[in-house]
Amino acid sequence: MKTDRRLDCLVAGDANADLLIDGIAQLEFEKEKLATHMKLVLGGSSSIFAFNLARLGARVGFVSVVGDDFFGQFVEERLRWAGVDLRALRHRRHTSTGLTIWCKKGGQRAGITYNGTIAMLRARDITDHDLRRARHFHVGSYFLLDKFHPGAAALFRKAQTFGLTTSLDCNYDPAETWDSGIRRVLPFTDIFFPNENEALGLINTRNVEHAARELAKLARIAVVKLGGRGALVCTEGRLFRVPAVKARVVDTTGAGDSFDAGFLACFLKGGSLEAAARAGAVAGARAVSAVGGTGAFE
Ligand SMILES: Nc1ncnc2c1ncn2[C@@H]1O[C@H](COP(=O)(O)OP(=O)(O)OP(=O)(O)O)[C@@H](O)[C@H]1O
Ligand SMILES: [Mg+2]
């Protein structure tokens, strides 16, 4: 069959807007409080990843579901601005795009999320044609994507059969069962990107090196993100650490997605695992230095 690999990476997953409100420590019913600042930014783990990977120079396509409303248009506008190919983006009529409102005061924040279209993506929304256009396939926020779980393993398997490499970021499991069929997906995953808590939850251990070694028996490469302590990489019994890059922390939203983007931008250009992990740490440090998940990549 003819292949047309115009994209370095096809990204599938969640997309939403984040409304950041500053200066509100507590809300009270029947009272109105005045915020000091507000900013509407691109949210969603997978959409932040797609935006930042495109800004790092990769050719990126994005499959997700947005509603036919202002926030859906906003998400599209931001991704288009970053140069992301949106021809496979799905629109759900009469449905609201997901929105998170973050109230921040000092270093603390509280969020309210309306899920809307966030978890509506199904595995069958990613067509053979979409896959055949790309060299690599990445899914973010796996645990959030309820409707995606049933066909996920078959989709990852198909992607590899079509010659793509694959990667997966699970993010936090709101159900805290650490299952949702992910163990059936990992054998078809080249690079798995959990953070420390997620890795510990998945393997049910307190030892992160043990978790990384066990995860690297399921996926080909396990990359465990350790926040301000950098990351652990494990593959075929070999384990190494990369330190974090020093940063002035403004907002840690999207640090993990940015690490994934930095890692893959290097890896997809043929970089070694060590070079890719260092590039991930550079992108993670860059992300925490500005407001929002994409602020440092604009
Ligand atoms: N305070 C920090 N200073 C420097 N680098 C950081 C800092 N926090 C995070 N990073 C970088 O970003 C990477 C990813 O961060 P983290 O481990 O918090 O991922 P995550 O929990 O998946 O994030 P997210 O909340 O976006 O899902 C880290 O591995 C590190 O390289
Ligand atoms: Mg994460």
Image (cartoon, helix red, strand yellow):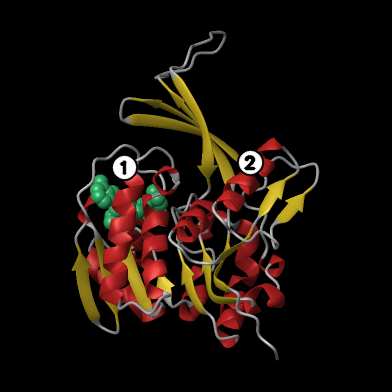
Front-lying residue, 164 or 265: 265
**Going from the N terminus, do you reach mark 1 or mark 2 first?**
2
The residue sitting at 31% across, 64% down in the picture is 279
Q: Quadrant of residue 289?
A: top left
**Residue 167 visible:** yes
Residue lying furthest top? 31
The kind of residue on which mark 2 rests is Phe
Q: Residues within 10 Å of mark 1 (few under 14, many from 20)?
A: some
Q: Residue at x 72, y 56 (%)?
A: 90
- From the viewer's side, name the closer residue of 269 and 112: 269
97 or 116: which is nearer to us?
97
Along the horizontal axis of the image, is 220 left or right of 21? left
Percent position of residue 275, x then y: 27, 72
Residue 174 versus residue 21 in the image, above or below:
below
Q: Is residue 16 left or right of residue 54?
A: right
Question: How would you rate the neighbour count of disc 2 (Cα within 10 Å): few for under 14, some for 14-19, many for 20 or more?
Answer: some
Q: Which mark is residue 289?
A: 1
Q: Which mark is residue 178?
A: none
Percent coordinates x, y for residue 83 in the rendering: 57, 57
Q: If the image is split into quadrants, where does the N terminus sit?
A: bottom right
Tag 1: amino acid: Ser
Image spot of residue 238 (x, y percent): 23, 81
- Report the residue marked by disc 2: 74
